[in-house]
C-alpha cells in the first residue's frame, strides 16, 4: 500500500452553505459501512509523479470525470494508519449520478479461490460540512478544518 497519497477535496456553495464531495469506497469490506467510511477521492503517488498530477489522475479514475479548474494546495495530513495525504482544494460541481469508477480485483470470499471485481468507489455524494464531519474517515477530518480555514482567510 502506498504510504503517500494525493487527492482533491471538491467543494461548492449552495443556498444552505458549503458542501463537499466525498466518495464511498467499493468492495465487500466497506459495503455496510457509512458513518466514518467516506473519504476524498485519492490514491498513491507514483515514483517521480507530482502530487497534483496524482490527485487529478485519481479523481478521474475513481469518479470517471476529469475535474475542471486548477486545484490549489490545501494541506498535508497523516492518517491514523501512517499514510500521508496531500490534499488539493477545488471549487466545482459534479453530478454524482454520473460517476463511473475504475475496478479492482480481489479474492472474495476470502480463501475461496474465486476472484471478483468491484468498483474502487461505489458512490459519491455532496455533504454539508456538518454531515461530512460525521461521514468522513476520522483521520481525514482535518481536511475539512483546513478547507474551512482556507475559505475563511
Image (tube, rainbow, N blue to C red):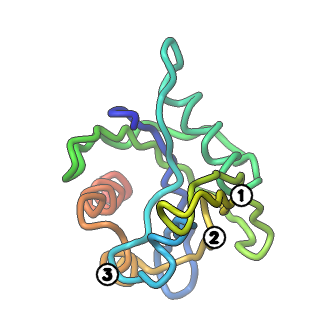
The residues bearing labels 2 and 1 have C-alpha atoms spaced at a distance of: 7 Å
**Residue 79: where, in percent of width, then height?**
24, 49
Q: Residue at x 68, y 64 (%)?
A: 93
Which quarter of the picture shows residue 119? bottom right
Against 119, is 60 above or below? above
Q: Are marks 2 and 1 in contact (CB under 8 Å)?
A: yes
**Residue 69: where, in percent of width, then height?**
68, 43
**Residue 138: where, in percent of width, then height?**
24, 67
The residues bearing labels 3 and 1 have C-alpha atoms spaced at a distance of: 24 Å
Comparing labels 3 and 2, the label whose residue is closer to the camera: 2
Against 8, is 37 above or below? below
Residue corresponding to mark 1: 101
Residue corresponding to mark 3: 134
Secondary structure under the numbered disc 2 in the rendered image: strand
Q: Which of the marked residues, 2 or 1, is nearer the chain's N terminus? A: 1
Depth check: give the residue in front, 75 or 152. Answer: 75
Q: Residues within 10 Å of mark 2 (few under 14, many from 20)?
A: many
Q: Residue at x 46, y 43 (%)?
A: 88
The residues bearing labels 3 and 2 have C-alpha atoms spaced at a distance of: 19 Å
Q: Residues within 10 Å of mark 1 (few under 14, many from 20)?
A: many
**Residue 21 seen in the figure:** no
Residue corresponding to mark 2: 122
151 horizontally vs 28: left or right: left
Secondary structure under the numbered disc 3 in the rendered image: helix
Amino acid at each position: 500500500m502506498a504510504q503517500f497519497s494525493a487527492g482533491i477535496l471538491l467543494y461548492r456553495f449552495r443556498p444552505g452553505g458549503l458542501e463537499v464531495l466525498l466518495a464511498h469506497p467499493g468492495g465487500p469490506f466497506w459495503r455496510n459501512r457509512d458513518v466514518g467510511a467516506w473519504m476524498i477521492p485519492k490514491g498513491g503517488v507514483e515514483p517521480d509523479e507530482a502530487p497534483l498530477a496524482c490527485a487529478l489522475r485519481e479523481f478521474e479514475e475513481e469518479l470517471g470525470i476529469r475535474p475542471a479548474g486548477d486545484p490549489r494546495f490545501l494541506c498535508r495530513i497523516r492518517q491514523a494508519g501512517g499514510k500521508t495525504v496531500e490534499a488539493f482544494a477545488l471549487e466545482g460541481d459534479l453530478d454524482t449520478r454520473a460517476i463511473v469508477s475504475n475496478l479492482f480485483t480481489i479474492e472474495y470470499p476470502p480463501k475461496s479461490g474465486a476472484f471478483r471485481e468491484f468498483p474502487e468507489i461505489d458512490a459519491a455524494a455532496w455533504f454539508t460540512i456538518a454531515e461530512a464531519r460525521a461521514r468522513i474517515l476520522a483521520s481525514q477530518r482535518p481536511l475539512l478544518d483546513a478547507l474551512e480555514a482556507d475559505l475563511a482567510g
